[in-house]
């Protein structure tokens, strides 16, 4: 890949917009000109900071807590998750937490978390940024596609998987072969903010065909 961007002799590389994808930038005499995609064009962000000729880039705040698809990225699923479906999944997760007895104070804190969609790279299903009160969900579940449950308080699409209460998608069900949005919402949502319901201790541990892991 080749493209033209910037000038001078101090190129920098980093994730400037938090989408887990590194892109280019330049530093010249205290001015940072940063681009959010690896393509030609103007700077998406210009910041005046520092001096000298030795720029340093890095992750200075707490990075996002990832949820990854076990086994790596799948074959790219054609359908992508829409905002209305994401909202339904989050509301289903909230209902499940309420039914599980999460205290009112924790529920109030969780309601402040903002969920957004992005095309995350590789095997990323989601990223939780506790410091910013936000969670980013991958649009196509790392290539497996999302199962959005229309009945979040019941598990009719799943069968008991082991003696610890883990569930697996039933053969020929809508959940088979897909990632379960409800389980992913719970894992990304609850772990960073309350410490309760870790991935192996969610109100229902639903794997679909492909388990999720961090």
Image (cartoon, helix red, strand yellow):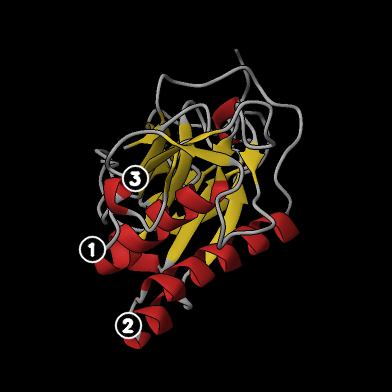
- Badge number at residue 105: none
Q: Nearer the viewer, residue 199 or 68?
A: 199
Residue 165 circle label: 3
Q: Quadrant of residue 105?
A: bottom left
Which of pointers 2 and 1 lies earlier in the amino acid sequence? 2
Q: Residue at x 43, y 57 (%)?
A: 186
| Residue under the image location 26 percent in, 64 percent down | 196
The answer for how far apart the CA atoms under marks 2 and 1 are is 13 Å
Which percent across, then down, holds residue 154? 56, 57
Left or right of 106 on screen, residue 25: right
Residue 4, by quadrant, is top right
Residue 214 appears in the picture as rendered: yes
Residue designated by label 2: 103
Q: Quadrant of the C terminus?
A: top left
Query: Residue 109's image quarter?
Result: bottom left
Answer yes or no: do the residues labelled 2 and 1 have beta carbons within 8 Å?
A: no
- Helix or strand or loop: what does disc 2 sit on? loop
Give the mark nearest the N terminus, 2 or 3: 2
Q: CA distance from mark 1 to mark 3?
A: 20 Å
Please state if 117 lies on the left or on the right of 23 as rendered: right
Q: What whole-number distance in Å separates the C-alpha atoms at marks 2 and 3? A: 23 Å
Q: Nearer the viewer, mark 1 or mark 3?
A: 3
Residue occupying image coordinates x 47% and y 78%: 112
Q: Residue, x 60% and y 26% (percent of image)?
A: 177
Q: Which residue is mark 1?
A: 195
């Amino acid at each position: 890949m080749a493209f033209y961007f910037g000038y001078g002799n101090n190129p920098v590389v980093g994730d400037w917009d938090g989408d887990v994808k590194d892109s280019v930038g330049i530093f010249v005499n205290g001015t940072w000109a940063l681009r959010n995609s690896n393509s030609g064009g103007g700077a998406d962000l210009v910041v005046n900071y520092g001096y000298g000729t030795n720029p340093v880039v890095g992750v200075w705040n707490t990075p996002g807590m990832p949820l990854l698809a076990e086994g790596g990225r799948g074959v790219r699923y054609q359908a992508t998750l829409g905002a209305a479906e994401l909202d339904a999944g989050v509301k289903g997760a909230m209902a499940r937490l309420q039914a599980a007895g999460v205290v009112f104070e924790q529920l109030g804190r969780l309601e402040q978390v903002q969920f957004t969609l992005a095309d995350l790279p590789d095997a990323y299903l989601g990223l939780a940024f506790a410091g910013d009160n936000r969670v980013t969900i991958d649009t196509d579940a790392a290539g497996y596609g999302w199962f959005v449950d229309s009945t979040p308080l019941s598990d009719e699409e799943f069968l008991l998987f082991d003696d610890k209460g883990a569930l697996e998608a039933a053969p020929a069900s809508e959940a088979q072969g897909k990632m379960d949005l409800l389980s992913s919402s719970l894992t990304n949502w609850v772990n960073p903010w309350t410490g309760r319901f870790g991935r192996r201790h969610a109100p229902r541990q639903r794997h679909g065909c492909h388990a999720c892991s961090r």
